[in-house]
Image (tube, rainbow, N blue to C red):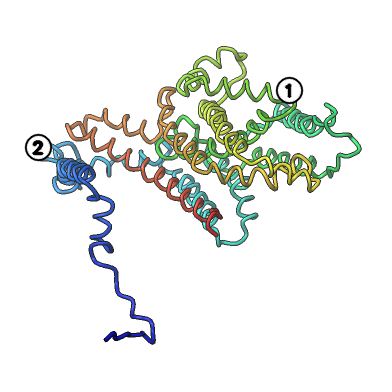
Amino acid sequence: MEIAYVRSEPAEALPPPTSSSGPIGWLRENLFSGIRNTILTLLALYLLWLTIPPMIQFLFIDAVWSGSDRQDCLGADVGACWAFVEARFPQYIYGRYPIDERWRVDIFFFLLAAGLIPMAIPRVPYKTLNAIFLLVIFPVVSLILLTGGDFEIGVSWWLALVFTLVLAEIIVLLPALLGAVPFAERKRPATVTLVPFAALALIFVIMGLDFGLREVETSLWGGLLVTLVLALCGIAASLPLGILLALGRRSKMPIVRMFSVIFIEFWRGVPLITILFMSSVMLPLFLPDDVSFDKLLRAIIGVAMFASAYMAEVVRGGLQAMPKGQYEGADALGLSHWQKMRLIILPQALKHVIPGIVNTFIGLFKDTSLVLIIGLFDLLGMVKLSLVDPKWATPVTPATGYIFAAFVFWVFCFGMSRYSMFIERRLDRTHR
């Protein structure tokens, strides 16, 4: 006799077994999934056991948190001398900037945070106004604040402005001059030239005004201030220059392509330390006696040119990864070359190479420590300079200072890395 049982409603779902879910399941799948992974996991745990407890002992348990001189950090069982870092902390931030003028640096840090934080949060409105503040207003205000303003804007600077305007006009007219685009088809309003010219002229006038601030030479700058100035200027200049160089290298115009290739290969083929040395020591030898450039300005230009060459190759990789159908689709819509690049090709190409772009930014931020060779004291340079003070000369002082500098660099670099991952996830449309 057969008895059949037919369920009239679905059975209640049972939870997965504990051996394949939760922390135990994660450990079995990722760390103990086989004999080889188990051996590697145990070896890694043993290495961590050998390194982490002594580090914690040195950095926190046996550390000296307060003191007035080296006597507080002497002893056989003394750990990190954080009292030394506390005593030298203002120098690590401001360098040798005058004490009574450091409020200007504080305003610089505040304006930087006030511009970057809203720009980095996608849901904050008024992105256009924020970008204008970061790219136009903030650099001018920061330059006046940090240096004191009241620049001598002579005839040579105005001639340089006119020369820049003429050069920009030639670049705009270059496709028509070479016959790539008929002159009759150029539809460019006069504001494309007049607005940038008026903005630059206004900036020159503002820089020439006397705001009553004390002049502070860049030779007195140092610490985190110099690190951020070099990194921000290099990042702000390398991305647009890199995009233009990448487009130029893929251009069909031989002159533009040759110039881009020569520029990229020259700057990529020379070490950054050599560029800084040449800009600081050798360049003044080729200039007239009455012509001189600020040492920090020369370092900024060298770092920006060096980073833009690497950025150009990153962007070029993104452009080459674009399917041919994207170009053909843009041509089918009747878009011009610049419209095609601005609206279709570049947004997708830059999204594909976000890791490479941020990697270049991180490398640039860390490479700012090389300016020590030309006499500019960034954060690492100020740490190294402070180690010669006999008041704090102890066996643990150098390690403490370098650990502090490493931690600051890690915070900034790790923050850029995590933010780039956030942008990648936000722009990812693969599974949507």
Q: In this orientation, does residue 99 appear?
A: yes
How packed mark 1 is, by other alpha carbons closer than 10 Å (few <14, some 14-19, many 20 or more), is few
Mark 1 lies on residue = 254
Quarter of the image for the N terminus: give it.
bottom left
Q: Residue 432's x, y, as percent?
A: 55, 60
Left or right of 11? Residue 105 is right
Q: Is residue 431 above or below residue 195?
A: below
Q: Residue 91's x, y, as percent?
A: 36, 38
Q: Is residue 394 above or below residue 423?
A: above
Mark 2 lies on residue = 75
Task: Residue at 21% x, 45% y: name it.
Answer: 41
- Disc sitting over residue 170 in the figure: none
| Residue closest to the eye, 336 or 214 | 336
Q: Is residue 352 above or below residue 380?
A: below
Q: Are marks 2 and 1 in contact (CB under 8 Å)?
A: no
Q: Residue 82's x, y, as percent?
A: 23, 43
Extreme residue toward the right, this view: 184
Q: Residue 95's x, y, as percent?
A: 39, 36
Image quadrant where residue 179 sits: top right
User: Of the residues shown, which amino acid type is indicated by label 1?
Assistant: Pro
| Residue closest to the eye, 283 or 315 | 315
User: Of the residues shown, which amino acid type is indicated by label 2?
Assistant: Gly
Q: Which structural element holds mark 1?
A: helix
Q: Which structural element holds mark 2?
A: loop
